[in-house]
Image (cartoon, grey):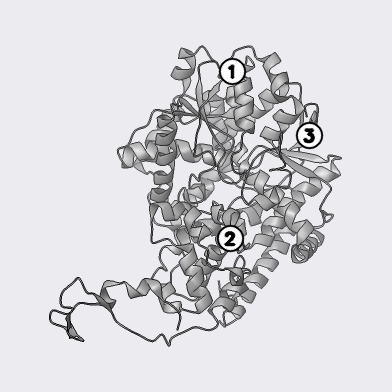
């Protein structure tokens, strides 16, 4: 039986007896808190293999739980619930139900790669975080995260034209996530800038917004990338035992 | 070390044609003032930034391999990328192409279908704008050319994530004296100190600004940036010097957002290191695009006799 440390100290697993005597010793009250015993039977034995089949998750099996990733983690410093070491443990043990408790924050990894830098086993924890976020979405446990939406909008533009026009990415992102484009803090910022810039510069910016910058002769690359992306999506779905049709 | 990189291929990348325009402009102006030649890659494409790798990492390798191939075709063995994202991705592609057969296969297949030669590892090396100035002109060369010393200006040098992590893609770093350090980078400190600035001890020089989630998780980014800003102020800095358009814009945007949304105003100004170097070399603030920055540093610079 693995030591299942974290779940043992959750409020719902704790027992406090108002009146209890064990072997003649009075153990009543909160000073003597018991932890419910339980047997874990709902392992997903395929979990590690499924994560390892997605890009970034390949080396999850190397982890020996030193905790360097969590110790160096940027997001953990502002949210202690964000715990890469623990999630890697759950993935390796197949404890899917436990992993799902944190399903809504795993995508918040900022890809700073401090974990990858610190990891003595080359697990690539940053990649594992991405693979796990994708796993959650592919399995239908979470809707596409704001980060995934942003990645998709950005990548679609690169694949289509070879280049990025930032204001277009931003407009599309706000539109697809149902946020107003004119966020208060953004408006003040842009207004301040406009008064400082020469008219010619603003005209140039406006033109870039209208006529999208693109790489010349990109059409063949676009087709090759589109074909590769749909193959990869189908392969990912097959690896997770989904329909294999690459539905998106 | 000085004397290398007099003429290199230049990969500005998408951000330097948009929000990072001031970085593009000041990089070119500094190159010109130092007598260095930049030849822009012909018909380059986006490197994939932080996003394409999340769709598939090997697509990012392909996008960067195409750019490296252009540099090779133009007869260059070195390409300079001032943007941390571009620099990181070119380095990552070079590493993956020389270590991973599956990446090579994907790049070969996509290159053939797209109708261009497959780039092979080892032909072109990628450098950052910091390497470029440090190893072409160097601190001594820079000192001789300083017309308008940054004396008295206290600077916190901020390098961000992608310049040093993950370390295995930067084999030339951590090679002892003279080389860059991934744990405590110092090339920007060295250059700005040579230009007369007082570089403060800044413990967060490689901390993360949350750039990957600037829009998708704004509160996290604002918290991270606010920490960078308040720490720089606590270290006594007037200015945070940046060397990445994503970090730079993130710092500026979330400085405004921290004030508007969190009610936490900060005074520290944010400038590209090339803007600071340019002004030290005698260029005007306008010439290095200070007016294009969201964080308005003009009053501070005027008070210090710069620009």
Q: Is residue A19 above or below residue A178?
A: below
| Quarter containing the C terminus of chain B | top right
Gap in Å between the C-alphas at discs 3 and 2? 31 Å
Asked whether the viewer can see residue A235, the reply is: yes
Q: Chain of mark 1?
A: B
Residue found at x 77% / y 26%: B2
Q: Measured along the vertical axis of the image, is residue A6 above or below residue B24?
A: below
User: Tag 3, which chain?
Assistant: B
Q: Please tell me which of labels 1 and 3 falls first in the chain.
A: 3
**Residue assigned mark 1:** B196
Q: Which label's residue is closer to the chain start, 3 or 2?
A: 3
- 1 or 3: mark nearer the eye: 1
Q: Residue furthest left?
A: A19
Q: Position of residue A138 (x, y in %)?
A: 51, 73
The reply, left or right, for residue B16 in relation to residue A221 is left
Q: Nearer the viewer, residue A129 or B90?
A: A129
* Mark pair 2, 1: CA separation: 42 Å
Position in image of residue A28 (x %, y %): 15, 78
- What element does badge 1 sit on? loop
Residue B51 in sight in this render: no
Among the 4 quarters of the image, the one containing residue B55 = bottom right
Binning the other alpha carbons within 10 Å of mark 2 as few (below 14), some (14 to 19) or many (20 upward) gives many
Residue wearing tag 2: B54
């Amino acid at each position: 039986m693995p030591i299942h440390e974290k779940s043992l100290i959750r409020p719902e697993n704790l027992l406090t007896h108002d009146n209890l005597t064990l072997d003649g010793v009075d153990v009543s009250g909160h000073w003597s808190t018991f932890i419910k015993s339980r047997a874990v039977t709902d392992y997903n034995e395929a979990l590690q293999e499924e994560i390892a089949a997605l890009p970034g998750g390949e080396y999850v099996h190397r982890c020996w739980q030193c905790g360097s990733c969590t110790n160096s983690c940027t997001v953990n410093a502002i949210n202690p619930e964000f715990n890469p070491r623990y999630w890697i443990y759950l993935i390796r043990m197949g404890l899917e139900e436990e992993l799902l408790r944190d399903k809504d924050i795993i995508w918040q990894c900022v890809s700073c790669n401090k974990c990858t830098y610190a990891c003595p086993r080359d697990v690539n924890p940053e990649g594992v975080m991405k693979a796990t976020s994708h796993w959650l979405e592919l399995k239908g446990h979470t809707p596409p995260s704001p980060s995934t939406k942003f990645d998709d909008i950005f990548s679609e533009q690169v694949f289509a034209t070879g280049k990025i026009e930032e204001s277009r990415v931003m407009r599309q992102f706000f539109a697809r996530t149902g946020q107003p484009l004119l966020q208060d803090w953004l408006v003040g910022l842009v207004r301040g800038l406009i008064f400082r810039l020469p008219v010619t510069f603003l005209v140039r910016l406006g033109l870039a917004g209208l006529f999208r910058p693109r790489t010349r002769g990109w059409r063949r690359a676009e087709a090759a990338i589109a074909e590769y992306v749909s193959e990869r999506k189908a392969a990912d779905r097959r690896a997770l035992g989904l329909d294999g049709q690459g539905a998106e | 070390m000085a004397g290398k990189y007099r003429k290199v291929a230049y990969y500005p990348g998408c951000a330097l044609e948009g929000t990072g325009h001031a970085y593009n402009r000041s990089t070119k102006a500094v190159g010109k003032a130092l007598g260095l030649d930049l030849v822009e890659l012909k018909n380059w494409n986006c490197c994939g930034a932080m996003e394409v790798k999340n769709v598939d990492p090997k697509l990012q390798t392909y996008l960067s391999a195409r750019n490296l191939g252009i540099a090779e075709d133009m007869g260059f063995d070195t390409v300079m990328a001032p943007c941390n994202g571009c620099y990181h991705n070119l380095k990552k592609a070079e590493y993956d192409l020389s270590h991973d057969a599956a990446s090579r296969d994907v790049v070969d297949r996509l290159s053939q279908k797209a109708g261009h030669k497959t780039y092979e590892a080892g032909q072109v090396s990628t450098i950052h704008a910091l390497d470029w100035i440090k190893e072409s002109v160097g601190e001594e060369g820079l000192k001789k050319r300083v017309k308008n010393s940054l004396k008295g200006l206290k600077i916190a040098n901020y390098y961000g994530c992608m310049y040093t992590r993950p370390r295995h893609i930067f084999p030339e770093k951590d090679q002892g004296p003279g080389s860059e350090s991934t744990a405590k980078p110092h090339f920007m400190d060295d250059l700005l100190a040579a230009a007369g600035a007082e570089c403060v001890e800044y413990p967060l020089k490689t901390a993360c600004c949350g750039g990957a989630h600037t829009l998708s998780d704004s509160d996290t980014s604002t918290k991270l940036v606010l920490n960078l800003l308040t720490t720089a102020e606590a270290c006594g800095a007037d200015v945070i010097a940046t060397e990445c358009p994503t970090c730079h814009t993130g710092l500026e945007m979330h400085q405004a957002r921290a004030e508007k949304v969190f009610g936490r105003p900060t005074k520290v100004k944010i400038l590209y290191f090339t803007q600071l170097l340019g002004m030290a070399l005698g260029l005007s603030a306008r010439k290095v695009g200070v007016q294009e920055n969201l964080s308005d540093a003009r009053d501070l610079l005027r008070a210090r006799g710069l620009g």
